[in-house]
Structure formats: structure tokens, C-alpha cells
Amino acid sequence: MKYENVQEYYGKVLQGSDDLQTNACCTPDDVPEYLRKVLAKIHPEVSEKYYGCGLVAPNVLAGMDILDLGCGSGRDVYALAGLVGENGSVVGVDMTDEQLAVARRHGGFHAEAFGYAGPNTVFHKGYIEKLDALGLADASFDIIVSNCVINLSPDKPAVLAEAYRLLKPGGELYFSDVYADRRVPTELLEDPVLYGECLSGALYWNDFENLAKAAGFSDPRLVEDRVLTIENPEIEAKLDGIGFHSATYRLFKLALEPACEDYGQTVTYLGTEPNDPAEFMLDKSHIFKTGDKVAVCGNTFMMLRDSRFAPHFDFQGNFDQHLGIFAGCGGGLPFETTSKPANTCC
């Protein structure tokens, strides 16, 4: 599938979310209240051209420098701009002129809505596989996000490699995308609707995890996922039984081990992140209640200690004594296998 096909689909075929033919681009209903307040300030034209499949607003964002890959009309850029504060910044990259035109129209509107002296956002036209062409410096971002876009890339390893290059040590790639339960036949890549609807370009989830590890992201962490039911008989027939999930992963730029190893370490969440006073979610398998002392593997220990999360935890232990494999980090198929109701399509 060529870049021009994607630009055509998102720039001309889709004029709004009502033009989508499947439910792949849907966002869960249970948006946190603090994020709901920010989203309520987004300009209507920006929201109307939002085609994401998840929420890309990780925790602990104040003062962060963020890059959004495939920012489209800027919905997530502006939401994140409201969360990082006036001392943070958000850069959006997209290749579709029509989408960027919408995004660029509303910088001043959102700065005023958030009470800032001026915009803390910038938009670039470019390809997410070729970020070096934009002159973005190595190790210049705390967080990189993307919302249902990497599946559209013809060179996914390059996207991951560029993200790794641009992240600061301890930074993370936090993104939502569509994944298949098997490898999608290559002939389906030529179907512009299947590709534009984020289906035929979706990676088999296990292939994705191996690509992430090859790029340097040693321990991919699944944050949340949901079954995609498609709900379009004609498209379902073309897919011939392939199952799809929308999923959010976080990948850290840290020197992590290939497996979860046990060093007898524990962590305690202090409850000091204002938006998460009762509990802190690292990933689907690691939700830390305030004040609870929790045993963790070495990788989880480093994800919390050697990242922006460190001030919010108390750490006990070191890496002096190895106790074998850590049994509490799961394995096998990471996704849910049954669909859940109550999704709001974008």
C-alpha cells in the first residue's frame, strides 16, 4: 500500500468519523474525569476529524516534551498540550495536508482555552518512518505517542527504530494500535478500505512484540486491549475469520532484561500523582495501590525507578542477589478474548 492511498483515504475519502466503515476507530467510554475535562476544550473541527482507536494519555505528564506520530487533525496533540502544562511541549507529525491544515488552524484557540500565553504545540509534515528528515534531535523527547497510525506504515521497523532514537533515556513510546491474531495475507494490503480502516496493515501481535524487542524495547508492556468486532458483513467476509484487537502498549528506552528476573525487590506507590491518588497503573498486570508494598521483577523495578515515575514510588532492594525467574508477569496470549460493550466510536 502506497503513501498516496493513505493520504487519499484520510484526506479526501473520510470527511468525518461518520464515514468510517468499521468500529476499529473507537475509543472506550471510561475516560478519566481529568482527561474528559481537557477533551471538552478541544475545538469541534479537530474532534470531528479524529480517527484514533484508543487513549494515548499516559500518567505523569506535567512538563514533558512529547512527540505524536501520525497526529492527524491534532486531537491528541491538543489534549496532551493541556496535560503537560505551559512548561511542556507537544510536536505533531503527519503526512496528510488536509489533516494538518485543520490542526494548524487552532493553535491559538487551544492556548487560550488552556490559559497559556501562547501555543506549546508545533506541527510538521513528514513521514513517521523518516523522522530524521525533520531534523529532530536524538534523545529529545520524554514520551512518544501514536494513535492507530503505526499499522498504516509500510515500514514498521523503521518507525520503532526512529522512536527509540528520539527518546531520552528512560523515556517511553506509548501508543494504541490495531493487532491481528494471525498474520494478515499480503493480498489484503491492496484493499484500500481494509487498509484505511486500520485492518489489513495490522501486525500479528507476536510479530509486533518481536519487532519492538529488535528495536531495543526489550520488554513490551500491554496497558489495555479490547476485541474489535468490525460489524460490517462485507468487510468481515474479506477478512475470513481473522480476529483483531485494539491495544495500547508502552515501550521503555531502558537497558531491560529479555525476561522478568527476580531480585527480591519491592516498590510502594506513594499516591503523589495528582490524577492517580488511589492507584498507579503501569500496565495491565501491574496496578499499584497507594501504600501497598509490592514485589516486582527487575524490569518493572527499573521502569519505575529509572523513568519519570521515580518520585512517586519508594524503592526497596537492588540487583545484588538473583533469585531466578519472576513468576508474576504473565505470558502467552496477552489480549482479552471476548468483546466488551459500551465503546464510543470516534
Image (cartoon, rainbow, N blue to C red):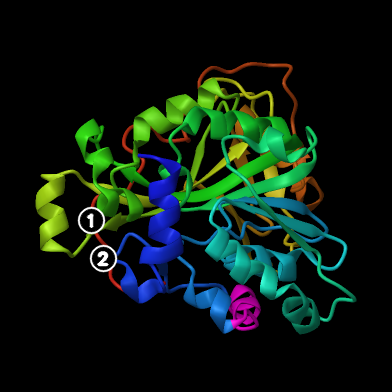
In percent of the image, x 47 and y 31: which residue is there? Answer: 155
- Quarter of the image for residue 341 reads bottom left
- Quarter of the image for residue 164 reads top right
Q: Magenta stretch? A: 33-43
Residue reaching furthest to the right? 117
Q: Are marks 1 and 2 in contact (CB under 8 Å)?
A: no
Under circle 2, the secondary element is: loop
The image quadrant where one finds the N terminus is top left
Q: Which mark is residue 338?
A: 1
Circle 1 Cα neighbour tier, 10 Å, few/some/many (<14 / 14–19 / ≥20): few
Residue underneath mark 2: 21
Q: Could one spot residue 57 in this view of the protein? A: yes
Circle 2 Cα neighbour tier, 10 Å, few/some/many (<14 / 14–19 / ≥20): some
In percent of the image, x 62 and y 45: which residue is there? Answer: 126
* Residue 126 within the segment the image draws in magenta: no
The x and y percentages for residue 343 are 35, 71
Tell me the kind of residue under disc 1.
Thr
Task: State whether the magenta stretch is mostly helix, strand or loop.
Answer: helix
Q: CA distance from mark 1 to mark 2?
A: 22 Å
The x and y percentages for residue 138 are 78, 32
Earlier residue among tags 1 and 2? 2
